Image (tube, helix red, strand yellow):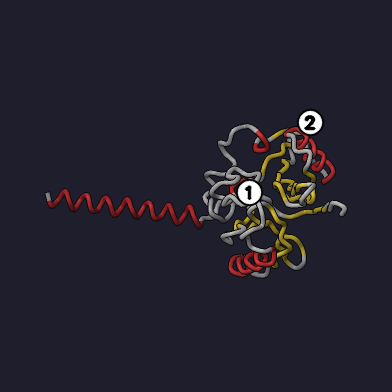
């Protein structure tokens, strides 16, 4: 009996060690998706119902996208297709691997979603990461746990606080970079960071917890354009 008890004890300790290791990887790991609460990348952008804005959509005939103008046409076609006619593009960026767009609400000016455009196929898809997991109004957990049920600014970090958190993260992980101006979304902020005055990448800051999620899926920055709605 003592031998059995010892064996069971050893197995229990081994099991707990494995669970603990997985937990550390899950919370703090870096993968193709970047850093953050879902750092392992195993639950983002996969398995959601093919409904609403979460599905990808090919804007017109299958052909490559070779300009910011083409990318914006693809985004507009996507918004029309899924029925979001009260949203407009406020920022469009070209990266090595894709085009990226911020789409905001006409009425409030708050960011509604972040979208990616595939350069080869014109397919428009929701950006993985915070856009899906932290977006309290348009994301997977809208109104639920990950968005903390808040669609207003109540209880959220200020833009300056988010920028300060981003700068501390950059100082610790990517020294020599400077945090840019934060763009507000429902439940989080997204911002560029710069190196020697030029955009190098992007990251997001959770609006309540201060969690930082590095966007590792873009590749090198190429160019961008911004649109601001007239007051």
Residue depicted at x 53% and y 44%: 43
Q: Nearer the viewer, residue 25 or 96?
A: 25
Question: How far apart are the alpha carbons under marks 1 and 2?
Answer: 28 Å
- Residue 177 is situated, as x and y percent measured from the top left of the image, at 68, 67
- Residue carrying label 1: 135
Dividing the picture into quarters, in which one does residue 200 lie? bottom right
Residue depicted at x 84% and y 51%: 229
Q: Is residue 188 left or right of residue 77?
A: left
Tell me the quadrant of the picture where the C terminus can be found: bottom right
The secondary structure type at the circle numbered 2 is loop
Q: As displayed, is residue 166 above or below residue 116? A: below
- The disc, 1 or 2, on the residue closer to the chain's N-terminal end is 2
- Image mark count: 2
- Residue 49 is situated, as x and y percent measured from the top left of the image, at 59, 33
Label 2 environment density (alpha carbons within 10 Å; few <14, some 14–19, many ≥20): few
- Residue carrying label 2: 60
Residue depicted at x 51% and y 55%: 29
Q: As displayed, is residue 79 above or below residue 136? A: above
- Residue 69 is situated, as x and y percent measured from the top left of the image, at 85, 43
Label 1 environment density (alpha carbons within 10 Å; few <14, some 14–19, many ≥20): many
Dividing the picture into quarters, in which one does residue 210 lie? bottom right
């Amino acid at each position: 009996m003592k031998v059995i008890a010892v064996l069971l004890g050893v197995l229990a300790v081994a099991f707990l060690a494995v669970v603990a290791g997985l937990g550390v990887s899950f919370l703090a790991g870096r993968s193709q998706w970047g850093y953050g609460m879902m750092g392992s990348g195993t639950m983002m952008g996969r398995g959601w119902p093919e409904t609403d804005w979460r599905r990808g959509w090919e804007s017109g005939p299958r052909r490559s996208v070779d300009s910011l103008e083409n990318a914006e046409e693809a985004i507009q076609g996507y918004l029309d297709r899924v029925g979001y006619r009260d949203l407009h593009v406020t920022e469009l960026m070209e990266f090595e691997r894709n085009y990226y767009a911020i789409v905001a609400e006409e009425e409030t000016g708050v960011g509604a979603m972040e979208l990616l455009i595939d350069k080869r196929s014109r397919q428009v898809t929701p950006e993985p990461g915070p856009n899906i997991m932290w977006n309290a109004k348009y994301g997977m957990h809208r109104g639920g746990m990950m968005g903390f049920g808040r669609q207003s600014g109540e209880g959220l970090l200020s833009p300056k606080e988010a920028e300060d958190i981003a700068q501390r993260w950059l100082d610790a992980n990517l020294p020599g970079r400077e945090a840019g101006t934060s763009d507000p979304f429902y439940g989080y902020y997204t911002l560029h960071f710069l190196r020697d005055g030029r955009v190098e990448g992007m990251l997001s800051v959770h609006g309540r917890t201060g969690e930082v999620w590095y966007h590792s899926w873009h590749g090198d920055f190429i160019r961008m354009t911004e649109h601001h709605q007239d007051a």
